[in-house]
Amino acid sequence: MDNNLTAITNLEFGKMIQAASDKLNKKAEFINSLNVFPVPDGDTGTNISMAFASGAKYEREVESNSVSDQAQALAKGLLMGARGNSGVITSQIFRGFAKGVEGKETLDTEAFAAGLVAGAKNAYKAVMKPTEGTILTVIRQAAKTARDEAQTTDNVIELMDKVYQSAVVALKSTPDLLPVLKQVGVVDSGGQGLVFILQAFNEVLSGQITDDEITTPDNSQMDEMINAEHHRSVQGELDPKDIKYGYCTEIMLRIGHGTLVDRKFNYDEFYDYLSKLGDSLLVVNDDEIVKVHVHTETPGKVLSWGQHFGDLVKVKVDNMRRQQEEIMEKDDADSDANDEDNEPVDTAVISICSGNGIAKLFRSLGVNRILNGGQTMNPSTEDIVKLINDSHAKRAIILPNNGNIFMAADAAVKVVDIPTVVVHSKSIAQGMTAMLAYNPDLDLQENQQAMEENLTTVKSGQVTTSIRDTELDGVKIKKGDFIGIVDGTIQTTNSDIVTTSVEMVKKMLDDESEIVTIIYGSDGNQEMAENIEKQIFALDDELEIEIHEGDQPVYPFLISVE
């Protein structure tokens, strides 16, 4: 490649976008690992990767030689595929970029810099309370460098290298700007995602990445990384006996560690062997970690093969035939609920949640549309838009029930054709409390105001498992212990799940407390819930305590206090 490139054409720009999507796909797990909370729900990498995969798909389908048209398509695809706040902010960066380069057939240094500057401004504008030490800091510094360098060089290769290096420096500064990052010892995960995008841009322009090194992500593989309901969608109404490879096997390896290591890691060799053991194979790696997902009849062989290259830090094997049996049983039980989702309504009241039991609870409160999603499964803007359009309602109300879904929900409001509002519920408990204020006789704005006023009347607690040793907000946490999180802050930790839950509730109770609701998930059970109930009664026998089966993943117990 010419080292004195003065303009980015449609050919270079297309390669830059596809390379960035490829890199994000490969680095998603690493970005996920930068989660501040030591809980098994880090999904920033997955969200940005999925959003950019959608943008790259739209870009590939553009039949134009204009970079402006490509940028517009990228922005549209990113918006529709945006998941989580990080995905939405990334989409806003490139929406601004597209506006900044509008009408440009090719991009010289000044045009490219103008795009980044417009991207930074748009991203800051999209966030209600911009916070430094995040992806915003990275794009702001990168844009400033681009603007300054464009005044002194017409070489886009030189410009891009300076922009990338500036982004790296900005990323390293994020712990100094956001104390919680320094406390945990990580950089901002969203900022890391943007750095990987700019790194891919730089590698394409400098010739470090060639055409044959860019892998176009397969949509079904990307779904494996985001959709915990994957097996349901793949298996559908299959007879369990018709499933060829019955064990969903996932392993994570530390390359080069372990007593059985006798081979140097080579991606092609590693992949080729596993490809012979089954199907739905996904191998994602960086320099230190390899993550494998495969459907196979011989999970033991997958584990043994992995140990040739590193030690096992995570192993998960699910019997998909048994899962299918359970799915078919639940499908029968849920047929009435599915019919309800197809009934015509004037107002589509939408709850975003995960778990059969939680969906039923929301329906009992007046919700008439359920969108599966939540922690680790943030729905995209397009998912929300499709559900609203498919409802054929005259208006809609969205309950995100998760702060990381706010921006995707807000983006959907701007795209749909019918009047729609978002009630900004941060948790399942808040969503349910909001529904107590819903009145079908009120208009959208009146309902939104009444429902949001109800959000502050409930305290939300979540119990889950720590995935690493850390200290956060003065609480020392050990890997494998249970932690209790109250309204976004870790309050307690213990090796016993019941003790953790009760200690968490103690932090939530006050003189005004009247009702405690315990919802147990797929990793909890009725017996443990009743044990928690008994110990809470011992604290205050005048409390009203309810127990419900929620079936939710990630959190064995969701406990609210009103």
Image (spheres, rainbow, N blue to C red):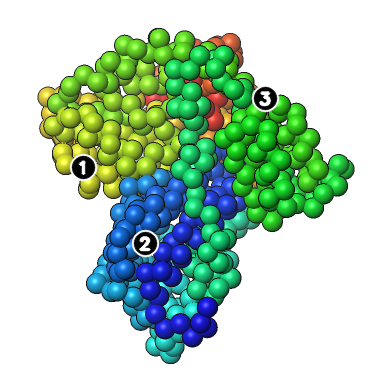
Instruction: Out of 468 and 89, give the one closest to the viewer.
Output: 89
Q: Amino acid at mark 3?
A: Glu
Dot 3 crowding, Cα within 10 Å, few <14, some 14–19, many 20+: some
Q: Which numbered dot is residue 297? A: 3
Q: Which numbered dot is residue 93? A: 2
103 vs 78, left or right, is left
Dot 2 crowding, Cα within 10 Å, few <14, some 14–19, many 20+: many
Q: Is residue 187 above or below residue 121?
A: above
What is the spatial separation of the Cα atoms under label 2 and label 3, in whole angstroms? 44 Å
Residue drawn at x 52%, y 78% is: 1
Residue 54: x %, y % from top left? 39, 49
**The residue tagged with tag 3: helix, strand or loop?**
loop
**The residue tagged with tag 2: helix, strand or loop?**
helix
Instruction: Out of 501 and 525, give the one closest to the viewer.
Output: 525
Residue drawn at x 39%, y 80% is: 7
Q: Which of the 4 image quadrants contains residue 108?
A: bottom left
404 vs 67, left or right, is right
